[in-house]
Image (cartoon, rainbow, N blue to C red):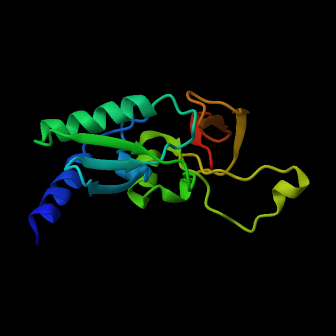
Amino acid sequence: MSNVQVLLEKARHLLESVTDPEIPVLTVNDLGIIRDVRMADDGALEVVITPTYSGCPAMGVIEINIRAALQEGGFENVRVVTVLSPAWTTDWLTEDGRRKLREYGIAPPAEASLDKKALFGERRALVCPHCGSTNTEMISQFGSTACKALFRCQECLEPFDYFKCH
């Protein structure tokens, strides 16, 4: 393994500690927003990210935290590059990230489906992260952050956030 490859692996490992400030159980790797980690021609370490959506207020903090984690890990010249295309999708969430969301009490994004209920104005059944029931209802299109909706379970009566599909 070359020296550059060793440095890139070290950087990727350091990025595993950078969490989302809005959902601190998720890392930037869990979210799938890290697109590339590379050495630039000028010797800078470049981390390429794609925001979960272009107006996400957490991205500035995430950039600062990425830079800080890498600098604390010994990388002096760090550049964070934001790319908007292709647009981020919840399909990029890792399975580990989906599990962490459930354990944290947030319903992960529903998988793609051939469910045609939406065509008739019916709701998709979400699984309550507290009790596992699909007897749930939306309370508000917006939850604690713009990327989540607020639901309530009709069985255990607990409210929960749903991480919206993008």
132 above or below 21? below
Residue found 68% across the figure and 39% down from its top: 154
Residue 134 percent location from the top left of the image: 66, 51
Q: Position of residue 78 (x, y in %)?
A: 24, 41
Between 53 and 19, the one nearer to me in the picture: 53
Figure label count: 0
Percent x, y for residue 89?
Answer: 57, 54
Towards the viewer: 66 or 113: 66
| Residue 85 shows in this picture | yes
**In the displayed structure, would residue 114 be above or below residue 31?**
below
- The quarter of the picture where residue 25 lies is top left
Residue drawn at 56 percent across, 56 percent down: 86
Quadrant in which residue 10 is drawn: bottom left
Quadrant of the image containing the N terminus: bottom left
Residue 99 or 112: which is nearer the viewer?
Answer: 112
Q: Is residue 16 visible?
A: no
Question: From the viewer's perspective, is 76 left or right of 150?
Answer: left
The image quarter containing residue 104 is top left
Q: Residue at x 65, y 50 (%)?
A: 126
* Residue at the farthest bottom position: 1
The image position of residue 80, as x and y in percent, is 34, 41
- Of all residues, the one furthest to the front in this rendering is 42
Tell me if 6 is positioned left or right of 65 in this view.
left
